[in-house]
Image (tube, grey):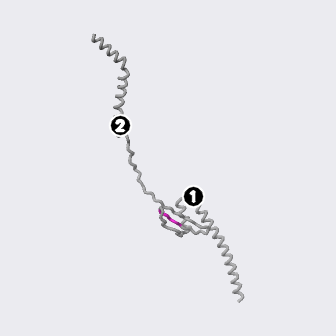
């Protein structure tokens, strides 16, 4: 009779508590993977490979070249916030040569300015030559009278 009683007790336990052991089985295996994930997370963080690119220090230099319509050029140089050179006179030929070395677009823009200055100087030269011719003629008339 004890066997019947045990079987009945097992049936009762199985009938009453099948959900509890299932929940315990789900919770129990769930906890160890969390513990396994934590140690695995530390080595799983890959370190960024060291860059083989050489780090260079940048230098901020500002060169300002200004020109006038008369063809006079000057340069200012600033290193960071410190003015290194101010109002340094440079020739138009040097400006033109430097511009050609830098880039053709820069050279084109500067050549336009230099050509305008050349044209202006040619016009002024022609005016002065005409005036000089008048002065020479006047001087010649004064010299003939003597």
Give me the residue at 54% from left, 61% from top.
Answer: 100
Q: Is residue 145 left or right of residue 15?
A: right
Instruction: Work out which quarter of the rendered image holds the C terminus and state it.
Output: bottom right
Q: Secondary structure at mark 1?
A: helix
Give me the residue at 54% from left, 62% from top.
Answer: 99
Vertical comparison of 77 with 145: above or below: above
Q: Secondary structure at mark 2?
A: helix
Residue closer to the observer: 46 or 15: 15
Label disc, if present, on residue 105 of the rendered structure: 1
Q: Is residue 43 left or right of residue 79?
A: left
Chief SS of the magenta region = strand
Q: Which residues are magenta?
A: 75-79
Q: Position of residue 137 (x, y in %)?
A: 70, 81
> Residue 20 in magenta?
no
For label 2, the residue is: 38
Residue closer to the observer: 86 or 137: 86
């Amino acid at each position: 009779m004890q066997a019947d009683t045990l079987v009945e007790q097992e049936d009762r336990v199985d009938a009453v508590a099948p959900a509890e052991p299932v929940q315990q089985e789900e919770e129990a295996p769930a906890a160890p993977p969390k513990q396994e994930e934590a140690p695995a997370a530390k080595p799983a963080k890959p370190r960024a490979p060291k860059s083989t690119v050489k780090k260079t220090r940048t230098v901020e230099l500002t060169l300002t070249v200004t020109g006038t319509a008369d063809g006079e050029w000057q340069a200012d140089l600033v290193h960071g916030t410190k003015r290194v050179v101010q109002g340094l006179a440079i020739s138009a030929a040097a400006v033109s040569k430097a511009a050609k070395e830098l880039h053709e677009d820069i050279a084109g823009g500067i050549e336009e300015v230099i050509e305008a200055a050349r044209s202006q100087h040619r016009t002024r030269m022609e005016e002065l030559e005409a005036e000089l011719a008048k002065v020479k003629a006047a001087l010649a008339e004064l010299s003939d009278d003597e």
